[in-house]
């Protein structure tokens, strides 16, 4: 047995996408399946696994697992990627709705970009990081810590990000960490992602978190252009309705074999 899949890049955030509307994978095995599928050297290699499922109240449901097998409440770029996938199956056209673990969302297509609403706590809370620097914490579907940087290119995102990600102030769940720098065009952002346990080329919820903090602290205007290592994303804000926009590109499609171990993850084929 094999499982069809697509690999998609959403501004450098890469994902494995599977049509799971018939729910044939064993739910108890999904964390292990995500880890094995997303493994760089022995799997497809990705920041996360996205499952497209049916939902009784919206057009579809998004189920997301990080590369380490942990379940994510939300992923902004992943939501845009799954929007591309659901549109490929003609589930929606130019405007749609979906449900993620953090609640309901809208999704949009305006060629060549996909947009998604982000459920955000729009009031950042200051945090004393205890190292002569400060940050702001907030939730944009998942927790984020936003830290201003004088030179984001020189930041040791892996080391400093990991330090804050596991700081006791954010225990037990931990936090994503965004380093941001104000620029003439908007913002530059680099992110350490919880669940990937390293820097990713882009982070959608992190971009929105960064934009919210920059609006509160620097008067950032919207729509805002935000550059990450993987490319540029745009954030819109109308009456605290946050929309994340950016490109989505299919990288390749194929069938998962996983060395013949697929059957151990399959509960039943309906």
Image (cartoon, grey):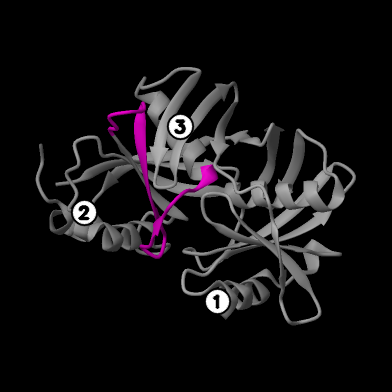
Q: Is residue 89 above or below residue 267?
A: above
Asked whether 56 falls inside the magenta stretch, the response is yes
Mark found first going from the N terminus, 3 or 2: 2
Instruction: Give the tally of numbered discs.
Output: 3
Question: In this figure, which residue is indicated by the disc labeled 2?
Answer: 27
Secondary structure found at label 1: loop
Residues under numbered marks 3 and 2 in contact, where contact means CB atoms less than 8 Å apart: no
Question: Distance between the Cα atoms at labels 3 and 2?
Answer: 22 Å
Question: In this figure, which residue is indicated by the disc labeled 3?
Answer: 83
Question: Distance between the Cα atoms at labels 1 and 2?
Answer: 28 Å
Asked whether 64 falls inside the magenta stretch, the response is yes
Crowd band around label 2 with a 10 angstrom C-alpha radius: few (<14), some (14–19), many (20+): few
Which sits in the foreground, 250 or 76? 76
Q: Is residue 133 above or below residue 15?
A: below
Q: Which residues are magenta?
A: 54-77
Secondary structure found at label 2: helix
Residues under numbered marks 3 and 1 in contact, where contact means CB atoms less than 8 Å apart: no
Q: Give how far across and how far down residue 21 sits, in percent.
A: 24, 35
Mark found first going from the N terminus, 1 or 2: 2
Q: Residue at x 20, y 41 (%)?
A: 23
Image quadrant where one finds the C terminus: top left
Question: In this figure, which residue is indicated by the disc labeled 1?
Answer: 166
Q: Quadrant of residue 223?
A: top right
């Amino acid at each position: 047995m094999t499982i069809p899949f697509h690999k998609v890049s959403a501004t450098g955030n890469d994902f494995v996408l599977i049509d799971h509307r018939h729910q044939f994978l064993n739910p108890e095995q999904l964390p292990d399946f995500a880890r094995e599928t997303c493994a760089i050297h022995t799997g497809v290699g990705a920041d996360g696994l996205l499952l497209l499922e049916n939902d009784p109240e919206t057009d579809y449901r998004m189920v997301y697992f990080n590369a380490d097998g942990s379940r994510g409440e939300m992923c902004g770029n992943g939501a845009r990627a799954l929007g591309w996938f659901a549109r490929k199956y003609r589930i929606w056209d130019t405007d749609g709705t979906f449900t993620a673990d953090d609640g309901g969302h809208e999704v949009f297509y305006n060629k060549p970009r996909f947009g998604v609403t982000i459920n955000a706590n729009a009031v950042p809370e200051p945090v004393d990081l205890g190292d002569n620097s400060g940050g702001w914490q907030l939730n944009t579907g998942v927790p984020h810590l936003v830290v201003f940087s004088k030179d984001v290119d020189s930041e040791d995102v892996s080391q400093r990000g990991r330090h804050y990600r596991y700081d006791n102030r954010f225990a037990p769940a931990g936090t994503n960490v965004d380093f941001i720098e104000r620029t003439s065009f908007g913002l530059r952002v680099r992110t350490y992602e919880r669940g990937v346990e390293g820097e990713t080329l882009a982070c959608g919820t992190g971009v929105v978190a960064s934009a919210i903090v920059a609006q509160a602290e620097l008067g950032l205007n919207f729509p805002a252009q935000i550059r990450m290592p993987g490319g540029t994303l745009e954030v819109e804000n109308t009456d605290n309705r946050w929309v994340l926009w950016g490109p989505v590109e299919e990288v390749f499609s194929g069938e998962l074999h996983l060395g013949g171990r697929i059957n151990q993850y399959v509960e039943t084929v309906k």
